Amino acid sequence: MIDYFLPADFAVRVFFAHSGFVVSLRFLATHDPASPVAMVFRRPLRLGLPVAAAVLTGFALVVAFPFDLARWSSAIGSYNGDFTTVPTFPDVLLDAAGRTLLTGSHSLPGGWWTMPIELYCSVALLLGLAVMDRFSVRLRLIALGAYVALLGALIVVRRAPIAIYPASIPDALLRYTVSFVPFLGGAALAQLWIHHRRLFQPRPESPQHRRWRTIALVAAPVGLAIGFVPSAAGRLLPGRPAWLQVSVGLAAVAVVAGFLCVPMLLRLFTRVPFGWLGRISFSLYLIRSVVQHTVMTRLVLALLDAGAPRTVAIVAGASTQLVVSLALADLLTRTVERAALHWGKPISRKWAQDLTHRWTPRADRGSPSPENTAATIDT
C-alpha cells in the first residue's frame, strides 16, 4: 500500500525536474556565462560532501544497530531489500571518497543510484546552457530537435530494459540520455518563469495565457496518474524500458508546471514546516533508508521480543525512524550541506570568470528586466 500511494521512483523524477529548474534560474535571468561554469566547478563538492557524510553516518548506524536479516524475515515475514551484510570500513571509505557519487554503487542501503544521474545531468545542463546561449535560436532548435530525435530512436529501437548500473559506455550514455528529460524540462520551465511570468499568473491576461494555464493545470494531475502507474503495477522505473522512463520524466515536468501555476501552493511550501522539509530533503533522502534498516528494525524486534503486538511494534518503529531521520537530516543540512553550498564559491567564481572573460554576449540578446531578476533572486 505504501508503494502504491508513495511511488518513490516518480518522486525522484520530480526532484530531477525541480533540480533542472533551480540550477537554470540564475543564468537564465542574468545570462552571465560565468554563472553556470562556476556551478559546474562547485557541483561535485555540493553533492559529494553530503553523500560522504551520509555514508559515514550510515556506517556508524550499521555498526551500532546491526541489521539482523534472519530475525527480521522471521518476525515480519519478508524482506524486499538488498542489504544483507555489514560492509567493511575500506568499502565504506571508498563509497564516501566518490564511488557512490560517480557510479551510484554502494555498500549501504539507500537510493544511491540517483547520485551520478544528478551529477552528470546537472553538469551537462549547465554547460549546455552556457554554450547554447552563444548560438542563434535556429541552432538551439536544431540541437533540441536532434535530442528529441535521439530519444525517439531509443524508444523505438531499445525495447530492452535500461540497467540501473550500466555495464558499458553505450549503456551509460543511454541511461543518462533518457534521464536528462526531466532536467531539460525543468530548464524549459525556468525559461518561461523568467521571461514569460504572466503565463503562471492566476488571472491570465490573454487567451494564449489562459490556454497555457489550462493545459498546465490539466497536465499536472495527468502527470501524477502517469507517475503512479508504474509503482501501482509493480514496475519500478530503474531497469525499465526507455519509453516508460521518458514518459514518467515528462509527467514529472508536467507536475512541476502545474505547481508553478498555483500561487497558494508556492506560498504554502515556503512556510514552516514545508520550507524546512524542503531544505533538509536531500539529506533526508540520503539517510532515511539506513535509519530504517538499523534503528527502526532493532526497535521493532525489541518490542516484539517484549511481547508488544505486531502492529504497535511496527507503528512505533516507523514513527521512531521518521523522527530520527528528520533529526539527522537537519543536523547534516546545518553542518555539511551548508558548508558544501558555501565552500569554494569565491575561487570557483574566479575560475569561471577566467575561463569566460573572452566570451562576448550576443548583441541582440538584450538584458532581463529588473523585476524578473529580482523575482529570480527572491525565488
Image (tube, rainbow, N blue to C red):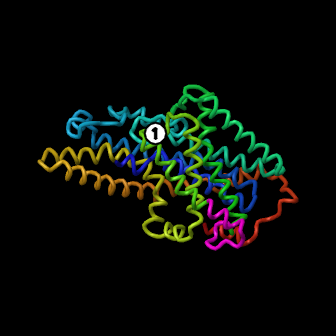
Above or below: residue 17 compared with residue 161: below
Most foreground residue, 164 or 31: 164
Image point (28%, 38%), residue name: 67
**Is 339 positioned to the left or the right of 40 in the image?**
left
Q: From the top left corner, tell me how far across and down residue 280 is, in percent.
A: 46, 58
Q: Secondary structure at mark 1?
A: loop
The residue at which mark 1 appears reads as 236
Q: Which of the 4 image quadrants contains residue 219?
A: bottom right
Pointer 1: residues within 10 angstroms few (<14), some, or many (20+)?
some
Q: From the top left corner, tell me how far across and down residue 86 is, in percent.
A: 33, 34
Most foreground residue, 219 or 295: 219
Image point (36%, 58%), residue name: 327
Most foreground residue, 34 or 167: 167
Q: From the top left corner, tell me how far across and down residue 232 is, in percent.
A: 42, 44
Q: Which SS does the magenta portion mostly show? A: helix
**Which residues are drawn in magenta?**
199-215
Image point (50%, 54%), residue name: 337
Going by the picture, which residue comes out furthest to the right? 363
Amino acid type, mark 1: Leu
Q: Quadrant of the C terminus?
A: bottom right
Q: How many marks?
A: 1
Going by the picture, which residue comes out furthest to the top? 168
**Is 186 positioned to the left or the right of 163 in the image?**
right
Q: Is residue 134 magenta?
A: no
Q: From the top left corner, tell me how far across and down residue 199 is, in percent.
A: 67, 66
